[in-house]
Image (cartoon, rainbow, N blue to C red):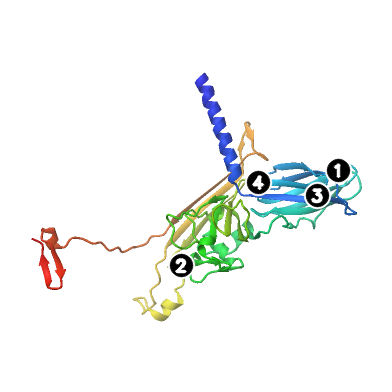
Amino acid sequence: MKHRLLSVASVIILLTTVSAAAYGQGPRSSLSGTVVDSSGAVIPGASVNVKNNATGSTFDVVTTDKGTFNIPALDAGTYTVTVALMGFKKAVIPDVKLNVGTPGTIKAVLEVGGLEETVLVLGGSEIVQTQSTTVATTMVVSQISQLPLATRNPLDFVTFLPGVDTPVTNRNSTVNGLPQSAINITLDGINVQDNSNKTGDGFFAAIVPHLDAIEEVTVSTATPEAQGAGQGGVQINFVTRSGTNTQTGSVYHYLRNPNLNSNYWFNNRDLPPGPDGHAPRDQVKLNQYGFRVGGPIVLPRLFDGHNKAFFFFNYEAFHQPTQISRQRTILTPLTQQGIFQYNTSGGVRQVD
């Protein structure tokens, strides 16, 4: 019995420790703001509720004597901010978008009235970044899923952003004229650049996330915050998707086959026609397929994970047959017989 209790306690401690570590490493943002009345005077003691629109998780704070509030650790995503105080109408600011590593600031104005009255602030959800000197650009999931990308590599989306120069291939890209060693790539806050395995170019990650598993990518091109992992002056932060209160999923298959594609213009111009009267095509055959699914964890009659527990799973396979020619150095027939020779200025000599 004692052994079983000890095992259960060990598991609980381990899960708590892992959860704490995951919390510290995750992609985070922050939200601060000021609450004022219609005359511009600050309002202390106002209740501020921040709700994640996707997961339903909420965070509650109270404004200080200067009418300000700050929530330092929020997941990147879209939130609804509700501000309330006795004697004032409740103010609701929907669709407040927070990006990873970029603090957001809002301003809520309360009008005199009763709490049962609600003022929906449709034009106040624009985030104003005033807490740091970070210059960042973010691409969200709608852009990632709608923009065409032949390579299916999320890193290539970074080449669309201002300040990125691609001289030859995407892997040779630089940002704002800085050397490639200044680029640092993280996935959910963890550095994924493997210096022991990569080549001299810095626009490369040992672990590249699947395109359908990405929620957003943020590129900080000037004065990134201290939370940016690694050595880079340019931070490329990928954030993976997570489950929400809505059950979602997709199945996909990307196929490339020479029988379905037209030939390259240069092949038609430079190559002689084959037996069929046409220039031969490049034999590129590629199958890339997978699926993703996410939502709340629901166990009928046992557990309802809405607003509490979620899951997300993505699987992707990549098949592309290729041929590679390699050169090998082997023993000559004489050497295999035990006869060793070497070349000199006077001719070939044999080892006795």
Q: Secondary structure at mark 4?
A: loop
Q: Nearer the viewer, residue 189 or 153?
A: 189
**On screen, residue 80 above or below 279:** above
Q: Closer to the observer: label 2 or label 3? A: 3
Residue 97 coordinates in the image, percent (x, y): 70, 54
What residue is pinned by disc 1?
A: 85
Q: Secondary structure at mark 2?
A: loop
Residue 116 coordinates in the image, percent (x, y): 88, 43
Q: Amino acid at mark 4?
A: Thr
Q: Nearer the viewer, residue 84 or 261?
A: 84
The image's mark for residue 260 is: 2
The image's mark for residue 246 is: 4
Name the residue: 54% across, 30% down: 11
Q: Amino acid at mark 3?
A: Val
What residue is pinned by disc 3?
A: 92
Q: Mark 2 or mark 4, which has the lower sequence index?
A: 4
Q: Mark 4 or mark 3, which has the lower sequence index?
A: 3
* Spatial separation of the CA atoms under disc 2 and disc 1: 64 Å
Q: Secondary structure at mark 1?
A: loop
Contact? badges 2 and 3 (CB < 8 Å):
no
